[in-house]
Amino acid sequence: MLAAPMFAPESGLCVPDDVYEMRLGLCRSCPKLIDGHTCAVCGCIIPIVAKLKDRGCPAPGAPRWTRYTDAGA
Ligand code: SF4
């Protein structure tokens, strides 16, 4: 899946690697993470959605990470 063209750096859709790793780390420490890859709040596969700039943590009220802009993660 991550080999798909939309996940290539030149697509412009993905966050930098350091932001991706930070997001994965935040999810790893979250009690809503199931089996190391699925978010119990949205049902998303985290190693995939954490790559995308337009996605953010869906936890109501206290998201652990937010939509990415050039100003930050
Ligand atoms: S996306 Fe948010 S709620 Fe879901 S596992 Fe990651 S940190 Fe937890």
Image: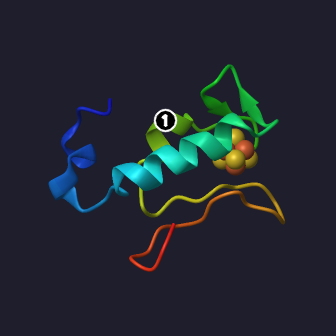
Q: Residue at x 66, y 41 (%)?
A: 27
> Seen in the image, is 10 located left or right of residue 14?
left
Q: Residue at x 31, y 59 (%)?
A: 13
How far from the left and from the top, in percent, is residue 34?
72, 26
Number of disc labels: 1
Q: Quick check: which quadrant has ligand 1?
A: top right
Q: Amino acid at mark 1?
A: Pro
How far from the left and from the top, in percent, is residue 21?
48, 44
Query: Disc 1 marks which residue?
Result: 47
Q: Residue at x 60, y 65 (%)?
A: 66
Residue 7 occupies quadrant: top left
How far from the left and from the top, in percent, is residue 67?
53, 67
Q: Residue furthest toward the left?
A: 10
- Residue 42 in view of the camera: no
Q: Residue at x 18, y 43 (%)?
A: 5
Residue toward you, 33 or 5: 33
Q: Please say if 43 is above or below 34.
A: below
Colour mode? rainbow
Dot 1 surroundings within 10 Å: few (below 14), some, or many (20 or more)?
some
Which secondary structure lies at badge 1? helix
Q: Quadrant of the N terminus?
A: top left
> Seen in the image, is 29 located left or right of residue 57?
right
Q: Please say if 12 is above or below 17.
A: below
Q: Residue furthest toward the bottom?
A: 71
- Residue 13 in view of the camera: yes
> Seen in the image, is 56 located left or right of residue 63?
left
Residue toward you, 73 or 10: 73
Residue toward you, 29 or 53: 29
Residue 24 occupies quadrant: top right
